[in-house]
Image: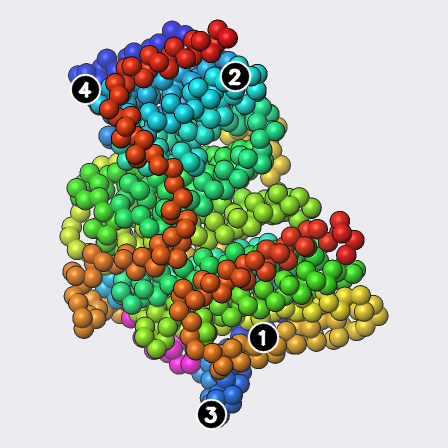
């Protein structure tokens, strides 16, 4: 294990995850012709919540206490599996564990709602489970095709030679479409449904528990927004010989974060919220796209691509 | 053979007078078998040891039927060649069920698979006993038998499935040509278990779904990765015994069967809630490790394993949702509504669940047990149960967190529309949209209820005689 890379990843992630959410809020506000909160607003929210008292509903048991921490630990663990601004990943072959952590964390959020006992929380939780069941197979397929195309499960910036372009682009597109639902924002915020459920699964959480859950979600979103860096790195892989660290590592990472934030803000500003059935139809097509990218990624060497 | 005869005769005879004595005697006989195997007087294979130990562990269930248990144990460890042990087993189970006045779905399935088995045997296929195995394991389309088995015949179901699974594992070389089929059936079994579990409204159905998911993974592992199978066997069996026993204890204590009739029981049934949580985590973490193992094999270029890995990763998360839906509905998610007293066996059960999670966390333990029994060198299993480590870390951090931010307890919520008593009964109904979206999945089913209804009009003895006649003719041919 590369301890230095792990420490850098964790410190960086904790520092910038709320800032990335702040940036998204700012861009969304500007697109809607509002001034919007400062970029550091999400940090202020988290710090304020940690200073509040924590309220445990009478129906809340062991899971209600554990799930926020579990969400945070799962999100932090994602940064042990990939490179961010370091050339080497903390662990070898972390891609498989990353996929598993992404999928699991989607479902733990749902458990948070069910454990609160509040019917609105349960409704939010059940919607989250359904949405995750619809989205996660596409997410898994697109990430696995990335791993297959790179020929390695290690999520770092090492070049592996020429990579078949078509399956890579298909996989990248499927990943971006999944990211819209994974980030829990409009048009796919069916779980939280802020206009009618006031936060859905989060409804009973308050104070430090809510802060922990929010921080966990910011970290998860940051981790998900970091993945396109490996698509970009794979795209420019053949041209990376002799370029410096900043071009090969930092630029793909920054481009990835900015690109994802822009896409999420645009999607949030330009769309109304989808209903659950509409989301299921939409992700049926995304599943086909990601499955096709997986098949092509497997066949690419045989086809000579 | 004399010891096997003791195993067969003694408990049923004593059962006529006292069930407790029958259980104790059966336990003594099983221990005697293990000792004889241990000292080399009557050497036992790994599968036989697993069956004996499982039988022994199942005796923790108060309501176990020692007659059925001894029958199944006996037939499972007889060691007859070829398909005969399973064949005998199915006839005995069929007899036992018929004697109870119903043959249920097993009667129908037996009618389908027995002639097929004979035909495959006559044609000289090595995998002639596969149809029977699939029925006994409850693989789709025969999974209707599972819900029947776990709701009516309880712990025996685990032993029947375990015996069939061990047979499938021991004879895996015979099924090599059918590997893709077995893998697909295993994955379908897991997925259909999840879909059933997600909409189950009764505790018995939830139990069946949990068994189906776990055995699905074990079936897949038994055919593709020996080390993974050996690793998964002990913790998952212990977890299933815990879940099975506790679910039925709950039914017995409360007299309720609907999953929405419970809620908030963790306040009074602390050790039971802990045991269930540990067992769920054990099963999920085993699946997680399985997914990683499959995916690692797949990345080296085998598409079969890539797809298997993708399916298992999804399964891990979906199973987590299914388990915790059940857990929150039964043990949490409502303030305690009524005092429920604990079952008597809770400390045995708690010990089982801790042993299960320990085995899941330390792969060298179950692999070492296998090595000890078979006198083979220990398997190299270069994998760490990452998910379990993360969850343990999160649980430890939660303890620190709650000591730092001590939560203030708040009274029950009130929605403004309905009180908790009204909402308690309809908490699970929000999952109707799940059934709506995945309707095509639920509409796929064998019309076994209709055919079973026709079969129930037939005389079971007549059916058995016909089956025996077909068997004799088949063997003669």
Q: In the rendered image, which residue does mark 2 sit on? A: B121
Q: Give the range drawn in magenta.
A: A45-56
Chain hosting mark 1: A
Secondary structure of residue under mark 3: loop
Q: In which quarter of the image is the C terminus of chain A?
A: bottom right
Chain hosting mark 4: B
The residue at the point 54 percent across, 62 percent down is A286
- Marks 2 and 1 sit apart, C-alpha to C-alpha, by 60 Å
- In depth, the one of A263 and B406 nearer the eye is A263
Question: Residue B18, labelled with which disc?
Answer: 4
Secondary structure of residue under mark 1: helix
Of tags 4 and 1, the one toward the viewer is 1
- Marks 3 and 1 sit apart, C-alpha to C-alpha, by 21 Å
Secondary structure of residue under mark 4: loop
Question: Residue A34, labelled with which disc?
Answer: 3
Secondary structure of residue under mark 2: helix
Q: Do labels 4 and 3 share a chain?
A: no
Q: Badges 3 and 1: C-beta atoms under 8 Å apart?
A: no
- Marks 4 and 1 sit apart, C-alpha to C-alpha, by 70 Å
Q: In the rendered image, which residue does mark 1 sit on? A: A260
Task: Indicate the position of residue A272 as horizontal and vertical percent values.
Answer: 43, 78
Task: Compare marks 3 and 1 and give the one earlier in the sequence.
Answer: 3
Task: Compare marks 2 and 4 and give the one earlier in the sequence.
Answer: 4
Q: Quadrant of the N terminus of chain A?
A: bottom right
Q: Badges 2 and 1: C-beta atoms under 8 Å apart?
A: no
């Amino acid at each position: 294990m590369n301890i230095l890379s792990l420490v850098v990843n964790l410190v960086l992630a904790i520092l910038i995850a709320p800032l990335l959410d702040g940036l998204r809020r700012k861009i969304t506000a500007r697109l809607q012709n509002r001034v919007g909160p400062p970029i550091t607003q999400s940090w202020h929210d988290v710090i304020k919540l940690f200073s509040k008292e924590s309220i445990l509903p009478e129906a809340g048991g062991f899971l209600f206490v554990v799930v926020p921490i579990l969400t945070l630990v799962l999100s932090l663990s994602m940064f042990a599996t990939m490179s961010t601004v370091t050339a080497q990943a903390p662990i070898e072959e972390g891609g498989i564990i990353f996929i598993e952590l992404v999928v699991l964390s989607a479902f733990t959020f749902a458990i948070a709602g069910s454990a609160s006992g509040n019917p609105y929380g349960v409704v939010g939780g059940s919607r989250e489970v359904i949405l995750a069941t619809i989205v996660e197979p596409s997410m898994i397929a697109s990430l696995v095709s990335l791993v297959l195309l790179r020929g390695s499960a290690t999520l770092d910036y090492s070049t592996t030679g020429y990579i078949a372009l078509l399956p890579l682009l298909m996989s990248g597109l499927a990943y971006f479409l999944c990211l819209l639902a994974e980030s829990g924002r409009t048009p796919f915020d069916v779980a939280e449904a802020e206009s009618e459920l006031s936060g859905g699964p989060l409804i009973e959480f308050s104070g430090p528990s809510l802060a922990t859950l929010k921080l966990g979600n910011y970290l998860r979103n940051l981790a998900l927004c970091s993945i396109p860096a490996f698509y970009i790195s794979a795209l420019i892989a053949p041209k990376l010989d002799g370029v410096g660290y900043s071009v090969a590592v930092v630029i793909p990472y920054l481009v990835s974060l900015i690109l994802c934030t822009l896409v999420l803000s645009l999607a949030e500003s330009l769309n109304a919220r989808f209903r659950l059935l509409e989301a299921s139809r939409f992700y049926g097509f995304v599943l086909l796209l990601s499955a096709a990218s997986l098949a092509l990624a497997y066949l690419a060497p045989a086809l000579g691509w | 053979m004399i010891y096997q005869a003791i195993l067969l005769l003694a408990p049923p005879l004593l059962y006529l007078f006292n069930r407790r004595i029958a259980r104790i005697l059966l336990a003594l006989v099983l221990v005697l078998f293990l000792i004889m195997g241990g000292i080399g007087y009557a050497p036992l294979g790994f599968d036989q040891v697993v069956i004996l130990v499982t039988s022994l562990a199942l005796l923790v269930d108060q309501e176990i039927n020692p007659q059925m248990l001894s029958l199944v144990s006996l037939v499972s460890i007889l060691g007859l060649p070829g398909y005969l042990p399973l064949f005998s087993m199915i006839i005995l189970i069929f007899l036992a069920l018929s004697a109870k006045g119903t043959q249920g779905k097993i009667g129908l399935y037996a009618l389908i698979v027995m002639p097929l088995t004979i035909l495959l045997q006559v044609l000289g296929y090595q995998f002639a006993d596969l149809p029977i195995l699939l029925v006994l394991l409850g693989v789709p389309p025969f999974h209707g038998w599972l819900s029947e088995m776990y709701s009516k015949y309880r712990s025996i179901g685990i032993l029947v499935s375990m015996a069939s699974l061990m047979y499938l594992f021991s004879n895996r070389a015979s099924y090599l040509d059918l590997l893709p089929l077995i893998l697909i059936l295993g994955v379908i079994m897991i997925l259909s278990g999840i879909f059933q579990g997600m909409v189950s409204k009764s505790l018995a159905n939830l139990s069946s779904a949990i068994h189906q998911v776990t055995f699905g993974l074990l079936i897949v592992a038994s055919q593709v990765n020996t080390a993974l199978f050996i690793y998964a066997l002990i913790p998952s069996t212990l977890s299933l015994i815990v879940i099975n026993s506790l679910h039925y204890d709950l039914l017995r204590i409360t007299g309720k069967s609907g999953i929405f009739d419970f809620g908030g029981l963790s306040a009074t049934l602390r050790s039971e809630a802990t045991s269930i949580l540990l067992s769920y985590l054990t099963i999920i973490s085993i699946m997680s490790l399985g997914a990683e193992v499959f995916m690692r094999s797949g990345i080296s270029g085998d598409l079969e394993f890539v797809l298997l890995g993708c399916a298992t990763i999804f399964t891990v998360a979906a199973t987590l949702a299914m388990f915790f839906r059940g857990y929150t509905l039964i043990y949490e998610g409502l303030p305690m509504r009524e005092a429920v007293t604990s079952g008597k066996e809770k400390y045995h059960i708690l010990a089982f669940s801790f042993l299960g999670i320990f085995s899941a966390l330390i792969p060298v333990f179950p692999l070492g047990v296998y090595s000890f029994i078979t006198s083979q060198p220990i398997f190299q299993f270069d994998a760490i149960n990452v998910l379990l480590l993360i969850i343990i870390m999160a649980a430890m951090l939660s303890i620190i967190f709650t000591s730092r931010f001590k939560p203030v307890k708040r009274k029950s919520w009130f929605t403004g529309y309905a009180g908790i008593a009204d909402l308690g009964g309809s908490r699970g109904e929000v999952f109707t949209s799940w059934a709506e979206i995945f309707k095509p999945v639920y509409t796929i089913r064998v019309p076994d209820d209709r055919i079973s209804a026709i079969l129930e009009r037939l005389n079971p003895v007549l059916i058995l005689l016909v089956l025996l006649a077909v068997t004799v003719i088949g063997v003669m041919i």
